[in-house]
Amino acid sequence: LLEARVARDRSMVAFTFRANAFLHHMIRNIVGSLVYVGAGKQPGGWIAELLVAKDRRLAAPTFAPDGLYLAGVEYDPAFGLPVFRDLPRLAFDSP
């Protein structure tokens, strides 16, 4: 995981993740734990404890896919793959 950001605009929360690879349900698992912290069910330092423990069973439940969507994919230019720039953006996303 190279980057993880959380932004809030009134009732909407946007999670942004960048990585060189993703595992099945990885984002849903991370979001589930972040939501627990945001809802006050766990303290902020709990995320660091989870990472050190390396035990998925200690984390929050996998977040439901409802409301989560893939906003873009970027590949290393060395692969020569096309770049898509017309993907939907949220109003508070930075270009």
Image (cartoon, rainbow, N blue to C red):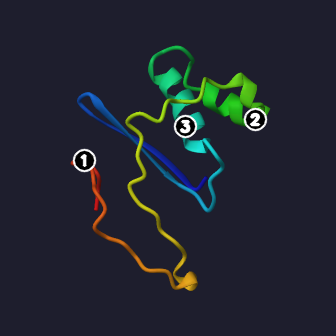
Closer to the observer: label 3 or label 2?
3
Question: Which amino acid, by three-letter code, is at mark 1?
Answer: Phe
Question: Which amino acid, by three-letter code, is at mark 2?
Answer: Val
CA–CA distance between discs 2 and 1? Answer: 32 Å
Q: Quadrant of residue 88?
A: bottom left
CA–CA distance between discs 3 and 1? Answer: 21 Å
Q: Are marks 3 and 1 in contact (CB under 8 Å)?
A: no
Residue 31 location, x and y as percent?
Answer: 52, 34
Residue 18 location, x and y as percent?
Answer: 52, 56
Q: Is residue 8 left or right of residue 30?
A: left
The residue positioned 62% from the left and 53% from the top of the image is 22
Closer to the observer: label 2 or label 1?
1
Q: Is residue 36 above or below residue 77?
A: above
Circle 3 residues within 10 Å: few <14, some 14–19, many ≥20: some
CA–CA distance between discs 3 and 2? Answer: 19 Å
Viewer-proximal residue, 68 or 49?
A: 68
Closer to the observer: label 3 or label 1?
3
Circle 1 residues within 10 Å: few <14, some 14–19, many ≥20: few
The residue positioned 55% from the left and 25% from the top of the image is 44
Q: Are marks 3 and 2 in contact (CB under 8 Å)?
A: no
Q: Which residue is tagged 1?
A: 92
Q: Is residue 72 above or below residue 64?
A: below
Question: Label for residue 52?
Answer: 2
Q: Which residue is tagged 3?
A: 28
N-terminal label among 3 and 1: 3
> Element type at marker 2?
helix
N-terminal label among 2 and 1: 2
Q: Quadrant of residue 27?
A: top right
N-terminal label among 3 and 2: 3
